[in-house]
Image (tube, rainbow, N blue to C red):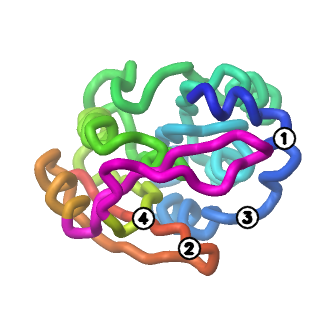
Amino acid sequence: MREYDLIAEWYASERRDRTGVPEVLAVSDAIAPGSRVLDAGCGNGIPLTRALIDRGHRPVGVDSAGEMLTRFRTNCPSTPAVRARVQSLPFAGASFDAAIMWGVMFHLPQTDQRAAIASVARVLKRGAPFLFTSADVDEAAGHIGAPMNGVDFVYYSFTLDDYRRILAEHDLEFVDFHADDGGNGYYLARKR
């Protein structure tokens, strides 16, 4: 995503909190040690990919922002990372034991969100959990949120019921939804 290329250096200095880590660790603890985990929209790898590594898993990072991947490779040097779009992941089917997609889905127009869910579903093994963040509101037209370091970002979403239906269309069973104290909505699903 071009916007993240523009703020990569700023983001690396600002994203030092642990937001999303408890949810990612809950997924981590529900799978076998040493599992292969897709971090779709991995950014610079801090803190979520690092949390997976620290738990003994084998994450694979994917991001469309080259500047973020440059920082990822510095922060997680022994972890593979690929520049790609989440809507068309370059992996064979059933390649991953779990997938996380934090801070990505809500940047994608609804058509691209559907493609991203289908793409992730394709690369997950049976029973694999899939955690992603988004709102619970029908936001088809998108809205511009508060700028990050002077760069505008557009946000999109479906409702919880729409996400349930879209997940089911791709053989993913909805498991849970909750919001954290910062208002981030977490969707957990599992490949059937």
For residue 191, side relative to residue 61 (left or right): left
- Horizontal and vertical percent for residue 172? 21, 53
Asked which quadrant contains residue 83, the reply is top right
Of label 1 and label 2, which has the lower sequence position?
A: 1
Under tag 2, what secondary structure? loop
What residue appears at the point 66 percent right and 34 percent down from the top-left corner? 4
Q: Nearer the viewer, residue 140 or 185?
A: 140
Element at label 3: loop
Chain-order first, disc 3 or disc 1: 1
Crowd around label 4: few <14 · some 14–19 · many ≥20 (10 Å): many
- Residue 102, percent across and down? 53, 52
Give the mark count.
Answer: 4
Q: In this rendering, would 191 be left or right of 86?
A: left
Q: Which of the numbered marks, if any, corresponds to residue 18?
A: 3
Q: Is residue 159 magenta?
A: yes
Image-based side of 169 in relation to 180, left or right: left
Residue that numbered label 1 is attached to: 10
Q: Which mark is residue 135?
A: 4
Look at label 4 and name its amino acid: Ala
| Cα gap from disc 1 to disc 2, whole angstroms | 22 Å
**Stretch in magenta:** 138-161
Distance from label 4 to label 3 (Cα)? 19 Å
Cα–Cα gap, marks 2 and 3: 14 Å
Q: CA distance from mark 4 to mark 2?
A: 8 Å
Q: How far apart in space, not on screen, are marks 4 and 1 (Cα)?
A: 25 Å
- In front here: 76 or 167? 167
The kind of residue tagged 2 is Gly
- Whichever of callouts 4 and 3 sits on the residue coming sooner in the sequence is 3
Q: Residues within 10 Å of mark 3 (few under 14, many from 20)?
A: few
